[in-house]
């Protein structure tokens, strides 16, 4: 029986090359998707938009906007709660955007 090369059960170098090309292509697509998530702008809000937060889909906050009507110096706890609610809304939207974009990769961490 003559030796034909290859990797045992992989059926030869050509199939291995194809597999490596597919893995490289998937890795490039994942990197592109992750870059898109970093550039995506997501807005979370609370109380009808009195407090808004802006972040990317990687959950990096870039800004907070507070309407003057949201500020009651006698009730700063309410403002703090609105900020937390707006952040959580933004995080929820960012998580959904990330899952939508990265779900195609099945959780692979290439």
Image (tube, helix red, strand yellow):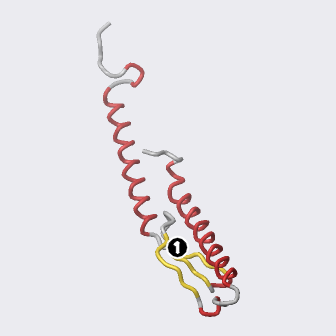
Question: Picture quarter containing residue 3?
Answer: top left
Q: Residues within 10 Å of mark 1 (few under 14, many from 20)?
A: many
Image position of 62 with respect to 76: above or below: above
What is the quadrant of the C terminus in the image?
A: top left
Q: Position of residue 102 (x, y in %)?
A: 50, 55
The residue at 49%/78% (across/down) is 63
The residue at 59%/72% (across/down) is 87
User: Pointer 1: what residue?
Assistant: 42
Q: Position of residue 41 (x, y in %)?
A: 48, 73
Q: Nearer the viewer, residue 67 or 8?
A: 67
Q: Position of residue 38 (x, y in %)?
A: 43, 65
Image position of 22 with respect to 68: above or below: above
Question: Picture quarter containing residue 2?
Answer: top left
Image position of 62 with respect to 57: above or below: below
Q: Is residue 99 left or right of residue 7?
A: right
Q: Nearer the viewer, residue 91 or 37?
A: 91
The residue at 52%/73% (across/down) is 42
What count of labels does the image hold? 1
What is the quadrant of the N terminus in the image?
A: top left
The residue at 40%/62% (across/down) is 35
Which residue lies most toward the bottom here? 68
Q: Is residue 45 left or right of residue 33?
A: right
Which residue lies most toward the top here? 1
Question: Picture quarter containing residue 65?
Answer: bottom right
Report helix, strand or loop for mark 1: strand
């Amino acid at each position: 029986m003559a030796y034909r090369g290859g990797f045992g059960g992989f059926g030869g170098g050509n199939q291995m090359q194809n597999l490596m090309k597919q893995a490289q292509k998937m890795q490039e697509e994942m990197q592109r998707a992750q870059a898109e998530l970093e550039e995506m702008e997501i807005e979370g809000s609370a109380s009808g938009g009195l407090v808004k937060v802006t972040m990317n889909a990687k959950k990096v906050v870039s800004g907070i906007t507070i309407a003057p009507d949201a500020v009651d110096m006698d009730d700063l706890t309410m403002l703090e709660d609105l900020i937390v609610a707006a952040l959580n809304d933004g995080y929820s939207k960012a998580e959904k955007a990330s899952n939508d974009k990265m779900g195609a990769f099945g959780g692979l961490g290439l």
